[in-house]
Amino acid sequence: MTRVALAFSGGLDTTVCVPLLEEEYGYDDVIGVTVDVGQPASEFEEAEETAEALGLDHYVVDAKEEFAQLCLDSVRANATYQGYPLGTALARPVIANAILEVAEEQGCTGIAHGCTGKGNDQLRFEAVWRDSDLEVIAPVRELGLTREWEQEYADEKGLPVEGGSGGDWSVDTNLWSRSVEGDELEDPSYVPPKEIYEWTNDPSAETQEIEIAFEKGYPIAVDGVEYDPVDLIEHLNGVAGAYGVGRTDSMEDRMLGLKVRENYEHPAATTLLNAHEALEGLVLTQEEREFKQLIDQRWSKKGYEGLIDAPLVDALEGFVDETQQRVTGTVTIRFEGGQARAVARDSEYAAYSAEHASFDTETVGKIEQEDATGVAKYHGFQRRLANSVTENEDEDTEVELATDGSGENEDE
């Protein structure tokens, strides 16, 4: 008997994939796998109910802790893509690995997803699965399915779906972020209504300050209370979201070259990334900060691509880990006007001396203000020299023009 494991959500796409895998691909048995990376309970209820109605063997894998740890790893690398924290992108490899493990345990010869041929997720899933010997199947992409066709097919087959996404928009939720796309939101000129937001309130004049403690680049406590990674993220999603923190409305460039409009909510991610960057600013040297920006950018790009296990990432994380040994301390964040701003930071590893930097001190140790005179003389020397050469050339040209045949004195 041939068996295929399907990444299963209970929505329209994955529901129609169940009979299609049997009819079009010839599999005798389809099993559904749902991976928990922090979705709402209602999504698991939907998946369970749909699987039961389909007579589908359904497996649920809890990967919240693994995913939460990866999210905090991304904080150390200040990971964002085109201005927003990586949420869906980081979750997909975690989900894909969990499904692959179930597929292999259950003796499957195939593994499938319901992604379209226009999005990023197909690439992120398959980057993991194509390391295996299983047949990788993408019915929606390979059969060129549209939502309209899927709905008609579901009606014809009597499949237990109401409308696919459960509303006007396509929503993807995990611990780190909530993305909303589709329908009128695809129009860049359309102003999103308040209803698209669930994690964040509209920003108000109210403010609150919290203190976040870091140890070697990892956030470990809020206001003196230690949390494990999952609870920490969930706590900050609630606290920061109440002040409207973490909304992004962006035109995103996908891996396939398409430009799409995406709306995101990510209160905890925004708060932690801002706090972490503020603490790095205190403890890292200028050279470390500048070079780390390059490292963070490359880490983020691989994370966006779903290639977080690439050899390059291992090498990048060697640098990240070395710099994070001193990123220990506290940061005070103020929630204000939809922003999470760092307003104070403290660390025993601070590469900073108030005594040396103060305008109120004349001499500290062997450093005096007048010592900067020599530096000031040399600073910009090459610029001045280069400009003077150019100016001399311009003057010579003016002299030549004034003394050529067109400039001769007619009285002579």
Image (cartoon, rainbow, N blue to C red):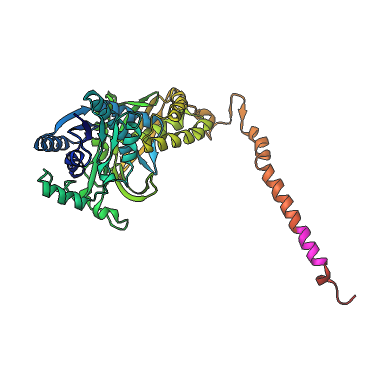
Where does residue 111 sit, x and y in percent of width and height?
A: 26, 33
Kindly give the residue lying farthest to the bottom in the view shown.
Answer: 411
Q: Is residue 166 left or right of residue 406?
A: left
Q: Is residue 410 left or right of residue 125?
A: right
Q: Nearer the viewer, residue 181 or 405?
A: 181
User: Which image quadrant for residue 99?
Assistant: top left
The part of the chain drawn in magenta is 395-403
Where does residue 152 sit, x and y in percent of width and height?
A: 15, 51
- Is the residue 159 above or below the residue 316 in the image? below
Where does residue 250 sit, x and y in percent of width and height?
A: 34, 49
Residue 222 visible: no
- Is the residue 408 above or below the residue 15 in the image? below
Q: Nearer the viewer, residue 169 or 79?
A: 169
Q: Nearer the viewer, residue 294 or 268?
A: 294
Residue 110 visible: yes
Q: Quadrant of the C terminus?
A: bottom right
- Is the residue 252 above or below the residue 404 in the image? above
User: Which image quadrant for residue 244?
Assistant: top left
At 81% from the left and 72% from the top, the residue drawn is 406
* Magenta: main secondary structure: helix
Please state the total of marks drawn on the protein image. Answer: 0
User: Which image quadrant for residue 101?
Assistant: top left
Q: Quadrant of the N terminus?
A: top left
Q: Is residue 147 left or right of residue 209?
A: left
Q: Is residue 116 left or right of residue 296?
A: left
Q: Nearer the viewer, residue 34 or 144?
A: 144
Q: Is residue 241 magenta?
A: no
Where does residue 48 sit, x and y in percent of width and height?
A: 13, 34
